[in-house]
Amino acid sequence: GEMVVVASERTRIPTFPRRRGKGQKRARRTWRLPPPRAGEGWGGGEAGEMVVVASERTPIPTLARWRGKEKIVPTGGTGMRASLAGWVFAAPALVVLLVFFGLPVLAALLLSLTDFDLYALADSRHLRFVALGNYIELLQTPMFWKALGNTTYFVVVGVPLSIALSLGAALLLHAKVARFKPLFRTALFAPVVTTVVAVAVIWRYLFHTSYGLVNWGLGHVGIDPVDWLGDPRWAMPTIMLFAAWKNFGYNMVILLAGLQAIPQDLYEAARIDGASKWRQFLHITLPMLGPVLLVVGVITISGYFQLFAEPYVMTRGDPLQSTVSVLYYMFEEGFKWWNLGRASAVAFLLFLIILSVTAVLVRFGRRRALV
């Protein structure tokens, strides 16, 4: 029941219960160690020792043993019991994740290896195991590649646009001259929490060819009406603009937190050296926001690859299938044509694409010391 703590000169040993027998009360003491003699340290184990004597049932806390520069943290039954308690508290959440996430993912993976369709749903004897046949067939389907091209175009153009809007809004809210910051922060974040279907319907009327507000405004400056959602050249850019407006508030809050964490001393030193606002932004703000921008980029890319609600509500994949995304193609395969095996294969191919892009971003971040 003994535990020896050897500490340095400046370490203040916390108060521990001291038990000497069953009938004695606890004696609490706080120790401040005396300074060592010249030429001596604490490695000998004599000066600065504190012996904690406890009974068998008294839990001894985990203490650090210092001998010179070496730190040894002993673990015992108390640490094991604390770890077990943590798993017990986390068990309900883990069970929910297993039941509602792990099992469906496993079922979808098994479905992707079969030709499960409407006939197999009615009679299991029609179900056949095709292994990687669905994946090979998808890679030979032109419509899949068209949907992947539309999604890639949406990600390549939409992600920088969304992050640029988020960073601009965060810089405006972080400016010292800004007023009513809570009001504007709430107003700019409001689109994130609105229902995407309801807002998409409103945007569909705003960009209507005949009586849309956008064409009405363009007509007042002498520009002919544009068929925003009926022209293949303008349909996807219109959806990009809507998605950027809908989602930039989320990234704005993250970037605003990153801006508030940058030390102001760096900006003061730059101003003293005569650096302009643009130089401060390039050489202080962007480098210090590097890890935050990496996180925002990963979140935005993974979200934009899963484009579905916007084209489903606004264009239904038209015109000329120019707004069909990978997720929209998966939806049609699974719930329009009832090829659930092919739809599951599309889902896992999209997962591999997102995983690959995320891995490239993380590798880039590690090379730049952002992770």
Image (cartoon, rainbow, N blue to C red):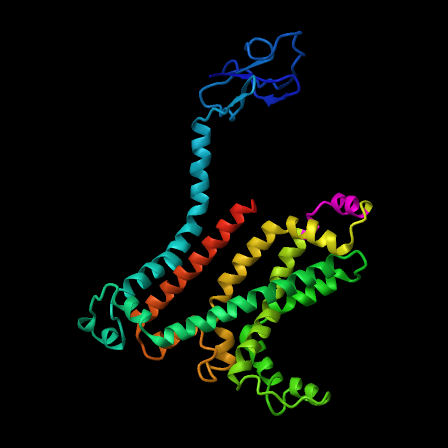
Residue 309 appears in the picture as rendered: yes
- Against 72, residue 310 (above or below) is below
Q: Is residue 331 left or right of residue 20?
A: left
Q: Tell me, yes or no, if residue 193 can be seen here.
A: no
Location of residue 366 in the rendering, given as x and y in whole percent from the top left corner: 52, 46
Choose top left, top right, bottom left or bottom right for residue 29: top right
- Residue span colored magenta: 259-271
Give the residue drawn at x 48%, y 78%.
323
Depth check: give the residue in front, 46 or 350: 350
- For image coordinates 64% across by 68% down, the residue present is 190
Main SS of residues in magenta: helix
Q: Is residue 198 shown in magenta?
A: no
Q: Residue furthest bottom?
A: 210
Q: Where 324 falls versus 284 (above or below)?
A: below
Q: What residue is shown at x 37% (from left), y 64% (from top)?
A: 349
Residue 137 position in % (x across, y down): 28, 71
Residue 292 image point, x, y percent: 60, 52
Q: Is residue 292 above or below residue 178?
A: above
Q: Nearer the viewer, residue 143 or 210?
A: 143
| Residue at x 47%, y 80% (from the top left corner) | 322
Q: Residue 192: x percent and y percent?
A: 60, 67
Residue 247: image quadrant is bottom right
Asked if the magenta segment contains residue 269, the reply would be: yes
Q: Is residue 162 left or right of residue 94?
A: right
For the residue pair 48 and 244, the one nearer the viewer reads as 244
* Label tally: 0
Which residue is farthest left?
125
